[in-house]
Image (cartoon, helix red, strand yellow):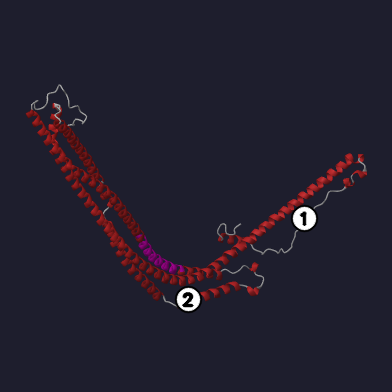
């Protein structure tokens, strides 16, 4: 549609002939055309309702986009929350199964440790029986070997303890029964977890549906802008026709070019109204598509909430399963405590006697260390006595030389101690509380050093 002349255009051009001639017949025909064009232009302005509807659709689409964003965010939040909770539930399931495996492993491990503790204790006692105390440490023949004999009696008393309650077969049956009960509970829990995980995985992603509304909204906005422009053209055409008609009614000549433009635009009015209707129909279709997507989001929201409700029921199953695990742990801990008490008794005996064997060798090494220190101390004393004696003789000689060279010139009372001899030093052994070391040969000490690991009392 060509641009229409503005209302302020000068229609009174004296040099331009009047359209239709200057006679009454020409003026009448011109007035009739203008009237027809004016009425058509006025009817076309009813298309404003189409533009109003277009604005309503745009506002509805914008509201739908906001609603879609809210629903999408809510669905995404619930889905992520469900996935996180199911991930945790999967970890809990693995933890519960790990607990079952750990207790079974610990039971088998404790049995092996009991066997090893028995073997260790028996080996240590056998070593004690075959390792008599060196005679150098024995001061009373009535106590010879008494510690080892008491240790054997102590070990025998502990070995006859708690094993009478349950035989090995009944204990294994008790353990198997506990594991079977827990296995059944874990199987039911895993089935529910798998079903719920499948339900969550089948939920579609809400983000694409929400994002796909931006393009339709942009299309609606573009159509609304175009329709507003078309309506503005119709309004301008109506204003021009109204102005020209008033000029004709007042017998004011109309410019021929202006009349031609009005005629051309009048022929396009119906096309413009049709285009407005077509664009609105297109917008109605677009809006219908938007509403369908909103409905899909509502359905997704309903399905997501339904799955979330299923998860709340699943949490109850999780609580029951955790109770079963706690009951299983309680029974296993009770059994493990009994076995560990027995194991602790055996290990304490083993530690005591292993410690005695190691301490005995360390004591022999300590005797050797003290003998070595004593020998070094005696050597130091000998060297000191020799040095003191040499210093005494040297000082005595120097004093004598001084008296011979300078004594005759010095008054006797100037220094009474001038003629004194040097002070003598004596080094004595202090035996307060000290005793003679046991008489151990070098061979005995070296054997003990070979039995003791480096850093364990070795010198």
Q: Give the mark toward the camera: 1 or 2.
A: 2
Asked where in the image residue 135 lies, by quadrant, the reply is: bottom right
Q: Position of residue 277 (x, y in %)?
A: 16, 43
Q: How many neighbours does mark 2 have within 10 angstroms: few (below 14), some (14-19), or many (20 or more)?
A: few
**Quadrant, the C terminus:** bottom right
Q: Position of residue 362 (x, y in %)?
A: 60, 62
Judged left or right of residue 445, residue 157 is left
* Image vertical order of residue 337 relative to residue 391, above or below: below
* Image vertical order of residue 214 relative to residue 11, above or below: below
Q: For the residues marked 1 and 2, what is the alpha-carbon distance in whole angstroms?
A: 65 Å
Q: Which residue is mark 2?
A: 162
The residue that appears at 61% across and 68% down in the rendered structure is 133
Q: Is residue 108 magenta?
A: yes
Q: Nearer the viewer, residue 12 or 114?
A: 12
The residue that appears at 59% across and 64% down in the rendered structure is 359
Read off the magenta span: 90-113
Asked where in the image residue 455 lies, by quadrant, the reply is: bottom right
* Image vertical order of residue 429 relative to residue 410, above or below: below
Q: Position of residue 146 (x, y in %)?
A: 60, 73
Q: Which residue is mark 1?
A: 427
Q: How many neighbours does mark 1 have within 10 angstroms: few (below 14), some (14-19), or many (20 or more)?
A: few
* Image vertical order of residue 72 relative to residue 349, above or below: above
Q: Is residue 328 visible?
A: yes
Q: Secondary structure at mark 1?
A: loop
Asked where in the image residue 457 lies, by quadrant, the reply is: bottom right
Q: Is residue 210 magenta?
A: no
Q: Position of residue 205 (x, y in %)?
A: 27, 52
Q: Is residue 210 visible?
A: no
Q: Nearer the viewer, residue 70 or 409?
A: 70
Q: Secondary structure at mark 2?
A: helix
Whichever of callouts 1 and 2 sits on the residue coming sooner in the sequence is 2
């Amino acid at each position: 549609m060509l641009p229409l002349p503005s209302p302020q255009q000068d229609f009174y051009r004296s040099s331009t002939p009047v359209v239709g001639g200057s006679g009454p017949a020409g003026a009448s025909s011109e007035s009739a055309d203008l009237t027809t064009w004016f009425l058509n232009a006025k009817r076309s302005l009813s298309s404003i309702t189409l533009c109003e509807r277009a604005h309503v659709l745009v506002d509805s689409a914008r509201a739908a986009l906001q609603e879609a964003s809210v629903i999408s965010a809510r669905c995404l939040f619930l889905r992520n929350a469900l996935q996180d909770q199911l991930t945790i539930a999967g970890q809990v399931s693995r933890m519960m199964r790990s607990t079952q495996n750990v207790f079974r492993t610990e039971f088998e491990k404790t049995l092996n440790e009991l066997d090893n503790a028995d073997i260790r204790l028996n080996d240590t006692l056998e070593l004690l029986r075959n390792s008599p105390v060196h005679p150098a440490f024995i001061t009373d023949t009535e106590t010879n070997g008494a510690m080892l004999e008491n240790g054997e009696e102590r070990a025998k008393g502990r070995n006859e303890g708690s094993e009478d309650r349950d035989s090995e077969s009944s204990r294994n049956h008790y353990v198997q029964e506990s594991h079977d009960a827990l296995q059944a509970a874990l199987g039911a829990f895993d089935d529910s977890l798998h079903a719920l995980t499948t339900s969550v995985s089948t939920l579609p992603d809400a983000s694409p549906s929400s994002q796909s509304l931006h393009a339709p909204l942009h299309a609606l906005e573009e159509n609304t802008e175009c329709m507003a422009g078309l309506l503005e053209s119709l309004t301008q055409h109506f204003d021009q026709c109204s102005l020209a008609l008033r000029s004709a009614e007042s017998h004011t000549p109309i410019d021929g070019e202006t009349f031609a433009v009005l005629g051309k635009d009048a022929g396009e009015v119906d096309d413009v109204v049709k285009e407005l209707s077509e664009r609105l129909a297109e917008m109605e279709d677009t809006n219908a598509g938007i509403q369908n997507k909103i409905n899909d989001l509502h359905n997704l929201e309903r399905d997501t909430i339904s799955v979330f409700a299923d998860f709340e029921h699943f949490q109850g199953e999780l609580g029951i399963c955790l109770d079963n695990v706690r009951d299983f742990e309680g029974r296993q801990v009770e059994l493990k405590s009994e076995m560990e008490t027995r194991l602790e008794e055996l290990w304490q005996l083993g530690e005591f006697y292993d410690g005695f064997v190691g301490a005995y060798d360390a004591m022999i090494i300590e005797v050797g260390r003290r003998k070595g220190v004593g020998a070094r101390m005696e050597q130091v004393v000998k060297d000191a006595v020799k040095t003191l004696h040499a210093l005494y003789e040297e000082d005595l000689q120097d004093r004598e030389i001084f008296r011979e060279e300078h004594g005759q010139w010095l008054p006797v009372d100037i220094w009474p101690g001038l003629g004194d001899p040097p002070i003598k030093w004596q080094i004595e052994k202090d035996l307060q509380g000290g005793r003679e070391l046991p008489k151990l040969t070098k061979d005995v000490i070296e054997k003990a050093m070979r039995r003791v690991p480096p850093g364990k009392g070795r010198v």
